[in-house]
Every structure is written in C-alpha cells, then in structure tokens.
C-alpha cells in the first residue's frame, strides 16, 4: 500500500455537508482534503433544491423575523416521528445561525426565502427559516464548473440555481480557503493508531493509497444505493432513488468499524418517483419526480387493487411513506382526473414504457430541465479542464 500525502483534515464526501465542513477547517487554517467517490463534486446536494433550513439567521432578523427557540423546538418535536436527542437539537439551533454567518463571510450569496415550514398547521410553523443561494454564474468557477455535478432534474444553463448554485458557491469558497478536492477517490477504510483515527485508505483507478490526517470528517451522504443496508435498516425494498449514486453508506459502515453507534438509520426521506424511461445515471435507473403527476388538482392515485391510499396533495415525505408502506405490492398508478389542469396530462393510467408515460416524461422534462442545447443536463464532463491526474484520483485545486 502506497503512502500518500498528509493533511490536517480529510473530509469524506463532497455534498453540502462535506464542503461546509471543509470550508470550516480550511478557514481555520487546517490543510484540508475533500475526497469524492464519484467523478463529480456535489453529491445529492447538487441535485437538490438547495433550500437550507436555518432558523434564527441574521438574514431573518434583518427582515424582522425574530425566532423563539422554544417555538421552533416545539414545531420540530411535533413533526418528528421519534423523540429528538435534546443535545443534538440544541447544537443544531446554536449552529444554524453561525453556519449562515460563516457562509456569508466566506462569500456565498445567501438570501432569505419567503417559504414557510412544511407542516403549516402545526403550531410554530413559520416563514423566515429557509435560506437559499442566489443564482450562481458558473463562469466564475472557471474549469471547476465542469466538475460540479449537473442535476438531471434542473435547467443547467447559466446562471445556476438551487443545489448546483449552493455547491458551486461552496466549491468557490473552499477553493479560495485552500481546500483541495479529489474526485473519483473512494475512502474505504479509516486508519487507526490505538483508539485514534489517523487517516483513510483511498481507492481510485490506481493502487490504493493511505492518506493521513489528524481529523477525519465523514460526510458521505445516505445509503439508498446499498440494497443490503436498505433491507437491514429500513426493512423495505426500494425500486430506486433520485439522489447521488455514490451514496452507499460507506461513511456509516466505516464509523461502525471504529465503534461509533448509529441511531435513527431507519428514518429516511421518502419521495414518490416515476420511472418513465430506461435512462440510467452512473449505472442506476434514472427516476422522475412524480409530483407533477400526483398532486395537481384532479389527480387520483390508486394502488394495484384500485384503492386510493393517501392524500395526493400531501407533502412528498408523507405520500412517499404511504407509498413505501405498500412498496411490495403491485405498482401504484396515476389515473386522470377531471380538472382543467389534469386534462393537460396524458389520459388514462400511467405505466412505465406506455405512450402516456412517455408523454408525461416529456412534459416533466421539458418543463424542468432543459440544458443549453435543448437537451437535459447530464452529469459531469470527464474531460474537464483544470484537472490533473494523480494517484488515480481526479485532483482539483
Ligand atoms: C431532488 C432532491 C431535492 C432535494 N431538495 C432539498 C432541499 O431543497 N432542501 C433540503 O434540505 N434537502 C433537499 N433534498 C435532500 C438533500 O439534498 C440531502 O439531504 C443532502 O443533499 C445531503 O447532503 P450530504 O452532503 O449529507 O450528502 P450528499 O450531498 O449526497 O453528498 C455525499 C457525497 O459523498 C460521496 N461519497 C459517498 N461515499 C464516499 C466515499 N466512500 N468516499 C468519498 N466520497 C463518498 C457521494 O458520492 C456524494 O457525492 C433534496 C433531495 C433530492 C434528491
């Protein structure tokens, strides 16, 4: 095994969590390396809406929203499905405003959105908690822009919005702070000396290397593409996910090997999706958001026995959970309703590969994600400039 460079801090995963952590360590003067398993920087975060729940920020105060922590706590406890660890919740509420401060100071152009908390009928739901990044001009990233994960669900023309803008802003700030980012580099094992973690083993196209660091931060996302873990921890069979295909639970498994306790692994973010074509993204089936089909007025969703099983306009998490609970039965189907809006959707029952499904796919895709040449954006370009090859990893700044 080859011994590679050493750093003060290694961050495993280049989503918003990992890049925020790297920004923190790099700005504190630590020599920081971000490892990313896939070719692209940004993980699910880059594919997301990029909305950040951060109650109590200075952006909110500037617009006259004062946060009562007891009220926010009450709201979160009411919507959680299990008791929340009080220390963790306190740490989150302490850190959220400080995180926004740090991101602003590092140059991210954050703004307060006018969005309300999801469960508006639960006491404590309010406006003023959700921040987002302003549209980001990828030109300012130079060659690095091609290495940011391009969402297949969004318009990727400049300026970028949503999760791509968030990740791009974080990449710019991390780079400026001196952090380095290696893509196509998978952390496979924590190196230990006694009880201390002292680095990671990294696998790439070439021979594995050992990279040492006194701090290792695991931010490798979820485990939705690890069917064994899904079966063991969630107890369901997922047909797929629409997040980053690199999310296979590596960080969780590595943490377990050094004795970390895991909690709430069975709680997942459910999302109702449709498989409308045979397209794949990095080897996994590409799904589409079922939202446009399910929650417009007049839509009716029934299961394989023709039974309605949830409120079609409920929040995606709740609808997805209801769908997941029936996951092993025949596929659920979307039937046409009678409102003016639903008449614009394809008629009849939607099925994969049916002409109806193809028509709906086209509508969803054309509305949501046209790229610069009328095609949907794809993932990162492999021939991106500014990339040096070294140790098999694609090394950035
Ligand atoms: C379409 C969509 C929209 C969403 N919109 C929102 C929203 O608006 N607001 C919100 O709060 N949430 C949203 N979410 C959820 C949110 O995107 C995720 O919860 C969040 O991005 C997770 O961030 P993360 O940094 O923990 O993980 P990720 O962003 O998934 O990053 C994890 C990274 O770690 C990498 N990795 C994994 N294993 C290794 C390894 N061994 N070595 C190196 N790298 C590794 C992965 O390849 C990946 O790039 C959305 C999700 C989706 C799918």
Image: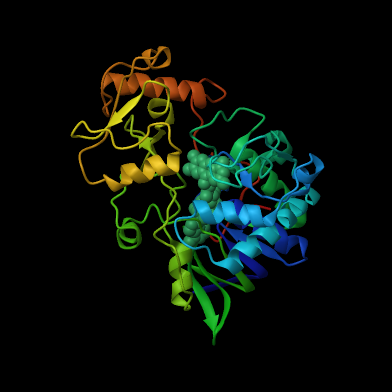
Q: Percent from the top left, x then y, of residue 14?
A: 58, 54
Look at 45% across and 54% down and name the residue there.
Answer: 247
Q: How many marks?
A: 0
- Residue 45 placement, left or right of 355: right
Q: Percent from the top left, x then y, of residue 378?
A: 49, 34
Q: Quadrant of residue 337?
A: top left
Decide if residue 14 is in sight here: no
Q: Is residue 3 above or below residue 328?
A: below
Q: Nearer the viewer, residue 42 or 163?
A: 163
Q: Is residue 381 above or below residue 28?
A: above
Q: Percent from the top left, x then y, of residue 296?
A: 43, 24
- Residue 214 placement, left or right of 76: right
Q: Is residue 78 above or below residue 314?
A: below
Q: Percent from the top left, x then y, of residue 84?
A: 52, 63
Look at 68% across and 48% down and name the residue there.
Answer: 170
Q: How is the image coloured?
A: rainbow
- Residue 121 placement, left or right of 140: left
Q: Quadrant of residue 22?
A: bottom right
Q: Nearer the viewer, residue 149 or 92?
A: 92
Q: Nearer the viewer, residue 18 or 185?
A: 18
Residue farthest toward the left in the current orientation of the protein: 305
Q: Is residue 186 above or below residue 357?
A: below
Decide if residue 235 is in sight here: yes
């Amino acid at each position: 095994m080859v011994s590679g460079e050493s750093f003060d801090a290694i961050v495993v995963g280049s989503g918003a969590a990992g890049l925020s952590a790297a920004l923190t360590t790099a700005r504190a003067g630590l020599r920081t390396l971000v490892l990313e398993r896939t070719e692209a920087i940004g993980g699910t975060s880059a594919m997301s809406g990029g909305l950040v729940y951060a109650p109590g920020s200075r952006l909110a105060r500037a617009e006259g929203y004062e946060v009562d922590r007891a009220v926010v706590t009450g709201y979160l406890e009411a919507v959680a499905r299990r008791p929340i660890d009080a220390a963790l919740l306190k740490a989150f509420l302490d850190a959220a405003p400080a995180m926004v401060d740090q991101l602003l100071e590092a140059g991210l152009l954050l703004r307060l959105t006018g969005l309300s908390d999801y469960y508006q009928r639960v006491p404590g739901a309010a406006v003023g908690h959700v921040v987002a990044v302003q549209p980001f001009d990828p030109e300012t990233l130079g060659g690095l822009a091609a290495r940011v994960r391009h969402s297949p669900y969004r318009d990727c023309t400049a300026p970028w919005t949503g999760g791509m803008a968030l990740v791009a802003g974080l990449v710019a700030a991390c780079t400026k702070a001196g952090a380095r980012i290696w893509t196509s580099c998978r952390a496979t094992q924590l190196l230990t000396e006694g009880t201390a973690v002292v680095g990671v083993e990294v696998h790439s196209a070439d021979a594995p290397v050992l990279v040492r660091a006194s701090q290792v931060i695991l931010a490798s996302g979820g485990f939705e593409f690890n069917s064994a873990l899904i079966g063991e921890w969630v107890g369901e069979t997922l047909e797929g996910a629409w997040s980053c295909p690199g999310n296979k639970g590596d960080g969780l498994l590595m943490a377990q090997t050094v004795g970390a306790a895991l909690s709430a692994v069975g709680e997942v973010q459910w999302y109702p999706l449709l498989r409308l074509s045979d397209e794949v993204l990095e080897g996994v089936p590409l799904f589409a958001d079922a939202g446009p089909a399910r929650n417009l007025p007049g839509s009716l969703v029934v299961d394989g026995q023709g039974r309605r099983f949830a409120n079609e306009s409920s929040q995606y998490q709740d609808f997805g959970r209801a769908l997941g609970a029936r996951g092993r039965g025949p596929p659920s189907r979307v039937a046409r309703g009678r409102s003016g809006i639903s008449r614009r959707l394809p008629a009849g029952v939607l099925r994969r590969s049916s002409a109806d499904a193809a028509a709906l796919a086209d509508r969803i895709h054309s509305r949501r994600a046209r790229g610069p040449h009328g095609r949907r954006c794809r993932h990162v370009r492999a021939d991106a400039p500014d990339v040096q090859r070294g140790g098999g990893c694609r090394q950035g700044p």
